[in-house]
Image (spheres, rainbow, N blue to C red):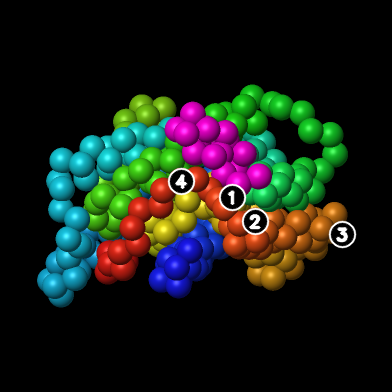
Amino acid sequence: MSHSEHKGHGIGAAMLLSASLIWGVAFVAQSAGMQYVGPYTFTAVRSVLAAIGLGILIFVLDRTNMKSKNNDKKVLWRAGIILGVVMTIASNLQQIGLVTTSAGKAGFITSLYIVLVPVFGLFLKRHPHPMLWVSVLIALVGLYFLSIRGDFSMSQGDLLVLASAVAFTFQILLVDHYSPKVDIIRLNCIQFSVMAILSFVPMMVLEQPKIGAISDAWLPIVYAGLFSGCGAYTLQMLGQRRVEPTTASLLLSPENVFSALAGWVILGQKLTARELLGCALVFVAIISSQLPWRKWFGKQAVAQEALPETVVQTDA
């Protein structure tokens, strides 16, 4: 890896960790918002806010001569619609699952994408270095210690969250495929616009929300829409331009850790020794995934995936 590639990888890793941090707090916001509104309402309204915020950002960037050079509208709209459909499925399954399962358990099950991404990647002829599989296993054990208390059994809500983890896996792989080809801000805007449209119909038919209830949930919705939607998902897309999918999934996995730490710092919630061990194991896995195994093991590649050429753009 050349100096410029190493620098680009470092920037990508920082973006993905930042996205994970924002999502960690957003998980708390999602659980809080569900006390006032239904899952489809939460997804629809936060998606509208995200689309509006990203639309304003696009307007500002276009007026300041910072418009992206990636302007293939056909590919952009195809990617945005596909990602929007996948994200609608993933987000709503997760929100519905949170009604009948604990936030910690849902977080652990969602994080199973760190295993699913490299497994699905095998069908795309992607073969991560064996040490990345070790990192995945360490992270999985850490997330289990952090999230699961007592016996682990699967309820209907857990199965819905597991289905959302599969959908999030496809989202990560699709972002890896499309992010080098299109304007990231526009891609994210279309994605959330599609999410808003697809969630609006079940919101009106199944939930019929009251304005007062939405107003009561304004803080979680605003955070999930602007910080998580506009910020974190844009950082994810930009970061994945520079980092291959298996490593990206590991860098996104400490979402649960950041959620637990946020509860500790902000809400005064105590962390047990088991939970602290889980946090430590996740960070060990992340550090392991960033070590130069290629250099240490000679010709063996850390991942035999061809990374897209790193182009520093001003999408974000």
Return the residue nearer the eye: 238 or 101. Answer: 238
Residue at the spot of label 2 = 297
Image quadrant where one finds the C terminus? bottom left
**Residue 300 got which mark?**
1
Q: Earlier in the sequence, mark 4 or mark 3?
A: 3
Mark 2 lies on a secondary structure that is loop
Residue 310 location, quadrant: bottom left
Query: x%, y% of residue 306?
Result: 41, 48
Residue 277 location, quadrant: bottom right
Disc 2 to disc 1: CB gap under 8 Å: yes
Could you tell me how far apart the alpha carbons at marks 4 and 1 are, in whole angstroms? 12 Å
Residue at the spot of label 4 = 305
Residue interval drawn in magenta = 114-130
Could you tell me how far apart the alpha carbons at marks 2 and 1 are, in whole angstroms? 6 Å
Disc 2 to disc 3: CB gap under 8 Å: no
Mark 4 lies on a secondary structure that is loop
Report the mark closest to the observer, 4 or 2: 2
Could you tell me how far apart the alpha carbons at marks 3 and 1 are, in whole angstroms? 37 Å
Return the residue nearer the eye: 70 or 191. Answer: 70
Residue under the point 34% across and 39% down = 83
